[in-house]
Image: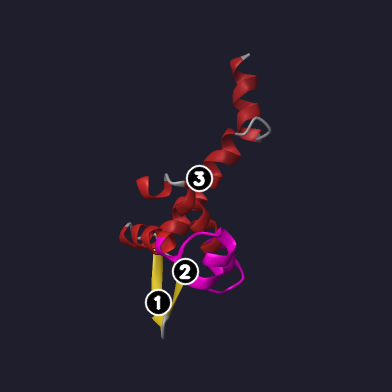
Amino acid sequence: MSALGDPTRMSIVEGVLGQEAIGQEVACWELDETLDLAKSTISYHTKILQAAGLIQTRREGKFYYYRPTAALKKIMLTLETIIDTTSPDSEVTKSHMAQRR
């Protein structure tokens, strides 16, 4: 999980998941343009995400393409569930608070 603790890596994850949602990989140049970071910085952070098993990398010619792994999708779904169920507006939270009164 420490791989997700960096804001730059979270931005990369958001980009990768966003493209995956429409059935596409994200290309290295798209991350360069979107994040406005040096190629070396993006390369450094994508290597950490790949080593953590959160993204897969495919090379085609001189370009790299990234997509999320099943592990990343599961982590993000779990986090969304936690946020949804602990939100002050969630039915689970409202029910729990009503029982405490």
Q: What amino acid is found at the position of numbered circle 2 in the picture?
A: Arg
Pinpoint residue 8: horizontal percent, then vertical percent: 48, 52
Q: Nearer the viewer, residue 78 or 35?
A: 35
Residue 75 counted in the magenta span:
no
Which structural element holds mark 3?
helix
Q: Residue reaching furthest bottom? A: 61
Q: Which residues are magenta?
A: 17-40
The amino acid marked with disc number 3 is: Leu
Q: Which residue is mark 2?
A: 67
Q: Residue at x 56, y 74 (%)?
A: 24
Question: What is the crowding at mark 2: few (fewer than 14 residues within 10 Å), some, or many (at least 20)?
Answer: many
Q: Nearer the viewer, mark 3 or mark 1?
A: 1
Q: Residue at x 58, y 37 (%)?
A: 85
- Dot 3 or dot 2, earlier in sequence: 2
* Residue 15 visible to an observer of this rendering: yes
Please report whichever mark, 3 or 1, sits nearer to the chain's N-terminal start: 1
Name the foreground residue: 27 vs 41.
41
Q: Secondary structure at mark 1?
A: strand
Q: Is residue 92 left or right of residue 43?
A: right
User: Given contact means CB atoms under 8 Å apart, are the residues at marks 3 and 1 in contact?
Assistant: no
Residue 97 lies, with reference to residue 79, above or below; the image says: above
- The foreground one among 76 and 34 is 34
Q: Is residue 27 visible?
A: no
- Which residue is at the far front? 38
Q: Position of residue 30 (x, y in %)?
A: 56, 70
Q: State left or right for residue 33 relative to residue 62.
A: right
Percent of width and height locating residue 93:
61, 29
Query: Magenta residues: mostly which secondary structure?
Result: helix
Q: Residue at x 41, y 86 (%)?
A: 61
Q: Of the residues shown, which amino acid type is indicated by label 1?
A: Arg
Residue on which disc 1 sits: 58
* Tag 3 residue: 79
